[in-house]
Amino acid sequence: MNNKSLAERLYGGIRHRSSVDLDILVQLSDVAGARNVLIESGFQDVSRNQRMFHLEFSRLTKSGVNVHVELHRRLIGYAMDGDHLAYGIAGSRGLTEHCWKRTARCAEHWQMRPAVELLYLCLHLTEHLMIERGVASSGVMCSSLMLARDIQLAID
């Protein structure tokens, strides 16, 4: 497996891909530890999603840049009564756990297998398409095209 992050592999580095936040998928058992690392690094917990899809953190750097990090516990949706909802569709129980079983530990991070990574990218695009459809008239910047480009680069 390649020992580079997605942004490094697709764009040559994180600075070459514009983004609003940094999404990090964390195993459920490691969420508390990851949260503590962010807090100790000067990030503030600014989580505001009621269903807790993810935890949100923010930090203002010395240069005045506001850095946003999201810790995701699942690839999609949220837990409800032992099942998962994926954008309102029930039945995705076990998907995140299945995907974690298909990862490999690299020197600095876990690396998804290409098929799992492609699944994640497609689900992420789907989420943003649904969100953007509801806010398109408000002038919010469309990130769907950038996410679609990620998929195209990953396939290439």
Image (cartoon, grey):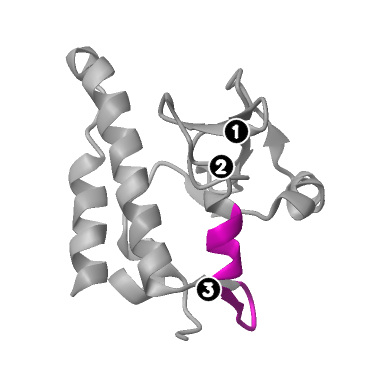
Q: Earlier in the sequence, mark 1 or mark 3?
A: 1
Q: Is residue 28 above or below residue 99?
A: above
Question: Between residues 29 and 43, which one lies in front from this camera angle?
Answer: 29
Residue 34 in sight here? no
Q: Earlier in the sequence, mark 3 or mark 2?
A: 2
Q: Which mark is residue 93?
A: 2
Q: Quadrant of residue 50?
A: top right
Question: Looking at the image, is mark 1 or mark 3 nearer the viewer?
Answer: 1
Tag 3 secondary structure: strand
User: Badge 3 is on which residue?
Assistant: 111
Please name the amino acid that badge 1 sits on: Asp
Q: Where is residue 104? Give x, y as percent.
A: 58, 78
Q: CA distance from mark 1 to mark 3?
A: 26 Å
Q: Where is residue 95? Give x, y as percent.
A: 52, 51
Tag 1 near tag 2, CB within 8 Å: yes
Residue at 59% x, 71% y: name it: 110
Tag 2 secondary structure: loop
Q: Is residue 39 left or right of residue 143?
A: right
User: Badge 1 is on which residue?
Assistant: 83
Tag 1 secondary structure: strand
Q: CA distance from mark 3 to mark 2?
A: 22 Å
Q: Quadrant of residue 154?
A: bottom left
Q: Earlier in the sequence, mark 1 or mark 2?
A: 1
Please name the amino acid that badge 2 sits on: Arg
Residue at 31% x, 58% y: name it: 17
Tell me which segment is drawn in magenta. 97-109
Q: Is residue 133 left or right of residue 98?
A: left
Q: Where is residue 138? Give x, y as percent.
A: 23, 13
